Image: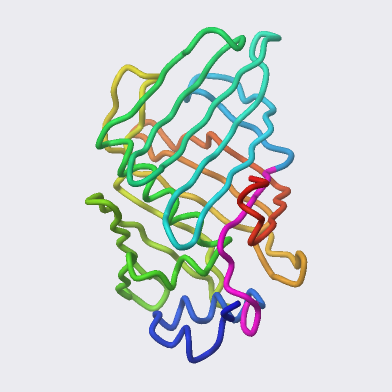
Amino acid sequence: MELFTETGIRGLPALLQKHIANGGYLNKPLMDNMLIRFHNTKFRMSPDSKPMNIEFMQVNFAYRPDRHAFLTGRMAGLPLNGKDSILDGHGSMTVTFAKVFQLFHVTGPEMDRAQLVTALADAVFMPSLFLQDFITWRETDDHTVEGEIRWKGVSSKGRFSFDECGNIIRFDTDDRYMDDNGKGGALTPWYVLYSDYKEQNGYFQPDSVSVNWSLPGGDDNYFVSDSIEIRYSVNEEAL
């Protein structure tokens, strides 16, 4: 397997090189995919709803920006299931209630862009994605790098912010549509916070994540997890 090396990452912006070195990835294999589980997770369906406890897991691929995320929880005592994904450039989001009622199923160009930029944000946990030729980089200042990801005719941009030590602490994008429970949506600023860096399986990675919409009335912090479990290069037949 190919390895992360100082020579191999030399074409990346210095900030991304620092993040990879800090994370303990150098001289370790480039990962093909990632299976990530978010434990102790709370999620809200809408800004005015109460948070619910959920189980959330996702699979990401490095050599193509496919991503599949699965949510399970309970609402009013009945099961709630959700899936959002991007496959071959086509994004979708589906939520069902009580295993029978489809609350919404969203597809289209807006969802394609949204899911693609979400895959870019997930590269914090799977830095082999940083090295792919379908992403281009631009350093915007001493603490920020902008990436543009292009795939199957779709493109999205996002900005990674770094702390003084060179660890990624935030991702921002203006390329996500906030869906109104299947009733349409609009481009809305979206950001992710990464914190509580800890050692896990020989890597130094965020153990907490917070996902947010920036709304006129205040930020909507709709997804929070403070225990993250990651496995790399899982046999695809087992995914």
Q: Residue at (76%, 72%) from the top-left corner?
A: 202
- Quadrant of image for the N terminus: bottom right
Q: How many marks?
A: 0
Question: Residue 121: percent from the left, percent from the top?
Answer: 46, 55
Q: Residue at (61%, 18%) from the top-left corner?
A: 80
Residue 217 sits in which quadrant? top left
Q: Residue at (67%, 44%) from the top-left corner?
A: 38
User: Which colour scheme appears in the figure?
Assistant: rainbow
- Quadrant of image for the C terminus: top right
For residue 33: magenta? yes
131 w.r.t. 216: above or below:
below
Pick whichever, 87 or 130, lies toward us. 87
Pick whichever, 1 or 177, lies toward us. 1
Pick whichever, 238 or 109, lies toward us. 238
Question: Residue 188: percent from the left, percent from the top?
Answer: 31, 38
Q: Residue at (32%, 17%) from the top-left corner?
A: 183
Residue 133 sits in which quadrant? bottom left
Q: What is the magenta range?
A: 25-38
Task: Judge left or right: residue 97 versus residue 53.
Answer: left
Q: Residue furthest left?
A: 153
Task: Judge left or right: residue 131 versus residue 126.
Answer: left
Q: Residue furthest front?
A: 237
